Image (cartoon, grey):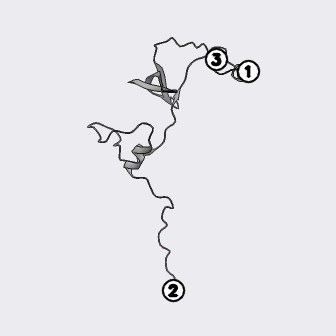
Amino acid sequence: MPTSAAPPARESSPRASPEIAAETALVPAAEAAEAGDLIPPGSPLARLPVEVDVAIPVREFRLRNLLAMAPGQVIETEWTQGEDLPLAAGEVQLAWTEFEVIEKLLAVRITRLA
């Protein structure tokens, strides 16, 4: 009895086009890659998610302090106002940032690359 090979498996979810990805991105990528870019915006690597952290040193802050917080309460930090904060992905520092309030959201603006 002859056997036939199964057709190649296809992905069940369609990939988003670059136009759709740019619409749903929090920070849209540039339309065209500039000379010297390491990863062009249209490449699959450019769509990989990266978790980034902005850490502010807070002295003597414990879980009990977090549980006791109330809306509108201010926490004193060790970082001086106007000083840029490091933005990192894991152990790699990527940039320096500053906080900014946009409408009612707290945002981070990149001031310079590391």
Q: What residue type is labelled 3?
A: Gln
The residue at the point 42 percent across, 36 percent down is 27
The residue at the point 41 percent across, 49 percent down is 20
Which residue matches tag 2?
2
- Check contact, mark 3 vs mark 1: CB within 8 A: no
Residue 97, position as x, y percentages in the image: 45, 23
Camera-near label (3 vs 2) is 3
| Corner quadrant of residue 47 | top left
Q: Is residue 7 magenta?
A: yes
Q: Which of 13 and 35 is in front in this view?
A: 13
Magenta span: predominant SS is loop
Camera-near label (3 vs 1) is 3
| The N terminus sits in image quarter | bottom right
Indicate whether 114 appears above or below 11. above
Which residue matches tag 3?
73
User: Which region is colored magenta?
Assistant: 5-9
Q: Is mark 1 on a helix, strand or loop?
A: helix
How many angstroms separate mark 1 from mark 2 (CA)? 71 Å
Question: 10 Å neighbourhood of mark 1: few (<14), some, or many (≥20)?
Answer: few
- In the rendered structure, the answer to whether residue 53 lies left or right of residue 37 reads right
Q: Is mark 3 on a helix, strand or loop?
A: loop
Residue 76, position as x, y percentages in the image: 60, 13
The residue at the point 70 percent across, 19 percent down is 65
Query: Residue 114: in sight, yes or no?
Result: no
Return the disc, 1 or 2, that comes first in the chain's sequence: 2
Indicate whether 106 appears above or below 32. above
Residue 69, position as x, y percentages in the image: 69, 20
Which residue matches tag 1?
64
